[in-house]
Image (cartoon, helix red, strand yellow):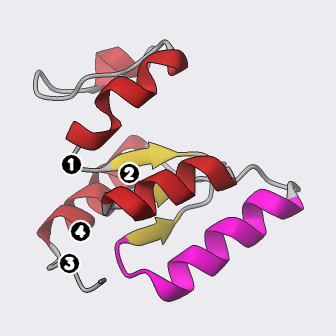
Amino acid sequence: MNIKDQTSADVEVLEEPYTLYRVMAGVDCAVTLAGLSTITELMVLGIPAVLLPLKGHYEQEENAETVASIRKNFLVADIGNTTPHKLAAYIKHLLNSPNQNP
């Protein structure tokens, strides 16, 4: 099933990753892998995020756990067991939580 079929009208799915720099500052919440550059950009911009590190990818797993331990607006989810309903719950939690980070 296509991810676009599971989203509402107020959610935009970016299929072209090279346009990310154009919209990152305007998003309310990000769902992303746990690459260091992306995490750093999100932290600097203060954008909450659900991180989905690749299984078995030590660097991504370590990045995600480290940032989530110090930033309350980052959640780590299991990429293999995150359903659309779980993902929606994570996003709602982040958006409804007061920003507790500097």
Cα gap from disc 4 to disc 2, whole angstroms: 10 Å
Is residue 73 toward the left or the right of residue 56 in the image? left
Looking at the image, residue 47 lies above or below residue 80: below
Residue identified by numbered label 4: 93
Secondary structure mostly taken by the magenta-highlighted segment of the chain: helix
Q: What element carries label 3?
A: loop
Which residue is denoted by mark 1 in the rendering? 28
Residue 48, given in percent of the width and then of the height, sits at 33, 61
Going from the N terminus, do you reach mark 4 or mark 2 first? Answer: 2
Distance, label 3 to label 4, CA atoms, is 11 Å
Residue 66 falls within the magenta-colored stretch: yes
At x 55%, y 62%, the residue is 77
Q: Residue 61 versus residue 38: which sits nearer the camera?
A: 38
Q: Where is residue 93 in the image (x, y as percent from the top left)?
A: 23, 68
The reply to whether residue 65 is visible in this rendering is: yes
- Circle 1 crowding by C-alpha within 10 Å: few under 14, some 14–19, many from 20: few
Kindly identify the amino acid type of the residue bearing the numbered disc 2: Leu
Q: Is residue 53 above or below residue 66?
A: above
Instruction: Magenta stretch: give its range.
Output: 58-73
Label 4 close to label 2 by CB (< 8 Å):
no
* Residue at which label 3 appears: 99
Report the residue at 43% width, 18% height from top: 19
Q: Which of marks 2 and 3 is nearer the N terminus?
A: 2
Q: Is residue 34 something one can see in this rendering?
A: no
Q: Looking at the picture, which amino acid does disc 3 mark?
A: Asn
